[in-house]
Amino acid sequence: EIFRKNIFPELLNVLSKNKKEPFPQKIFELGKTVKIDPSQETGVNEKDSLSIIVSGKAADFTYAKSIFESLCKNLMLKYKLKETNMPFLEQGKSAQAELDGKKAFFGELSEKTAKEFKIEEKTIIIELEI
């Protein structure tokens, strides 16, 4: 079993290897993530998380937000959005959310991160604890 803080880096790796497949590409994974938490007996807090990556011409902040809002509506989750400054997301085209005590983020993949993974298409990331 793999311990990871976020799921999306693995999905970006898959996307970088799928260049020969037609776009748009939509990839998701539901899995466990961990965060350091000294108050826990094991020293970590384990959560179930969902990560979604969409790559193609329509992949922009508005599309990411619409997917996020649709997920929240279908899962009956209330949320509060705020701007975020995560280094792997484009500044001004990303958001963090608090949803019923859980955390989420979404936005456009930064140019720097896209280059690191050799991704040429516009790409969005949505990741939330469920």
Image (tube, rainbow, N blue to C red):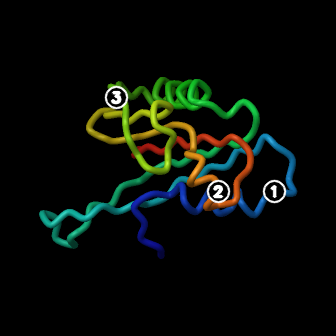
Give residue 110's mark: none
Q: With 62 as the anchor, is 104 left or right in this view?
A: left
Query: CA–CA distance between discs 3 and 1?
Result: 33 Å
Image coords of residue 105 (percent x, y): 43, 40
Whichever of labels 2 and 1 marks the residue nearer the N terminus, that label is: 1
Residue 95 higher or lower than 112, as above or below: above
Residue 125 higher or lower than 33, as above or below: above
Identify the residue at horizontal 15%, vertical 67% (top origin): 38
Residue at the spot of label 3: 82
Query: CA–CA distance between discs 2 and 1?
Result: 14 Å
Identify the residue at horizontal 62%, vertical 46% (top origin): 53
Image coords of residue 86 (percent x, y): 41, 46
- Residue lying furthest left: 39
Mark 2 near mark 3, Cβ–Cβ under 8 Å?
A: no
Q: With 54 as the anchor, is 97 left or right in this view?
A: left
Q: Quadrant of residue 103?
A: top left
Residue at the spot of label 1: 19
Q: Quadrant of residue 82?
A: top left
Q: With 14 as the anchor, is 86 left or right in this view?
A: left
Residue at the spot of label 2: 115
